[in-house]
Amino acid sequence: MESTLTGSALAASRAALSAAMAENNVLTSDDVGSIEPGEIQEINMEAQAEGIRTVFSDPTSFNVKHPLYSPWTLWFDSPMTKHRNLPQTPISAVPQTPLPQTPGVAAAQGWMEDIKRVISFDSVEEFWGLYNNIVPPSSLPSKANYYLFKEGIIPAWEDEANKYGGKWSIQLPKDKNKPNVDKMWLYTMLAAIGETFDPSLAASDPSGSPPNSLITGVIVSTRQQFYRISIWTRLAPGQDDDGLRERIEGVGRHFKVKVLGYTENQRLAGPLATDVEFVTHKDSEKKGKTKKITI
Ligand code: MGP
């Protein structure tokens, strides 16, 4: 079936899918392309068939799943979730692992009070199942946020995985971007779960263990007059950064060019709009004048 995704979204989706297929030793079209004409490729059909059941082998209970590098959790808040003890959302069908009781989680308790955990997932199929059943950002009320974070990391500065980090973000005026924001958010999520923000890392881990990626999560926020999309990183460049600044800037550039579709030198700041900017969480916490890196 022809994909309806375009450009960077298609690339990100393919990255997620091919990572998953590589883990399952499934032959991809790229593999087929590398076979010389006339060359015979040995495929262990039995091994391939084992554990993978399709509609052809069982018309009622096939179970093809393509695992992601790591499991992710979606969180949500809006004016509706504030100060209310809402029951768990009806789509939380996947078993939830309890939050680690780290000092960071305890410190963020006030902030996390109104943020509801929606669901965790660890496969491409579950991601699409979730995506197809939630309200897109363009239809959310203002003051709402989706937070998609690696499982075990809470969307708070205080979490151990976030406290030395920062965020790339872009602010987009609502009136001009209502038609684009849903795709921008989808492409951002695909780049996160497909680990394409920090590609050197994903490529350099042949063991199949989850890459210790710089990315901890991504957020979309709706406000009265603008949307904001953010990418949270585990670390932020310091004075002796040992190449870290370059890596962090690579994340910002990938976000701006490959995910959002702007050109590298395009200036985006304007009324209610910002460029793609990086701020450390420590600076965000201080709320004062912040040092920004702009891509
Ligand atoms: P925000 O929602 O990230 O910014 O943070 P925004 O959209 O500019 O502000 P808003 O008022 O329009 O929502 C808003 C405020 O929430 C911050 O100033 C902090 O007081 C608090 N806050 C945000 N974050 C991400 C955290 C966090 O991780 N931990 C804690 N403790 N407070 C936070």
Image (cartoon, grey):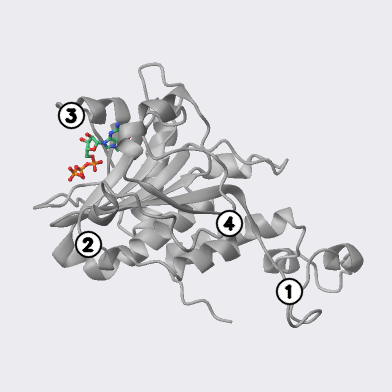
Q: Is the residue at mark 2 in contact range of ligand 1, meaning its CB lies under 8 Å from it?
A: no
The answer to whether marks 2 and 4 mark residues whose Cβ atoms lie closer than 8 Å is: no
Compute the Cα span from label 2 to label 3.
25 Å
Labelled disc at residue 94: 4
Q: Which element type, helix, strand or loop, lies under badge 2?
A: loop
At label 3, the amino acid type is: Lys
Residue bearing mark 2? 141
Q: Residue at x 41, y 42 (%)?
A: 251
Q: Is the residue at mark 3 in contact range of ligand 1, meaning its CB lies under 8 Å from it?
A: yes
At label 4, the amino acid type is: Val
| Image-quarter location of ligand 1 | top left
Labelled disc at residue 62: 1
Q: Which element type, helix, strand or loop, lies under badge 1?
A: loop
- x, y percentage for residue 120? 53, 52
Sequence-first disc among 2 and 4: 4
- Please say if 142 is above or below 215: below
At label 2, the amino acid type is: Pro
- x, y percentage for residue 47? 88, 62
At label 1, the amino acid type is: Phe
Q: Quadrant of the N terminus?
A: bottom right
- Front residue of 70 and 212: 70
Sequence-first disc among 3 and 4: 4
Q: Which element type, helix, strand or loop, lies under badge 4?
A: loop
Residue bearing mark 3? 287
Mark 1, other Cα within 10 Å: few <14 / some 14–19 / many ≥20: few
Q: Quadrant of the C terminus?
A: top left
Compute the Cα span from label 3 to label 1.
52 Å
Q: Nearer the viewer, mark 2 or mark 3?
A: 2
Sequence-first disc among 4 and 1: 1
Compute the Cα span from label 2 to label 4.
26 Å
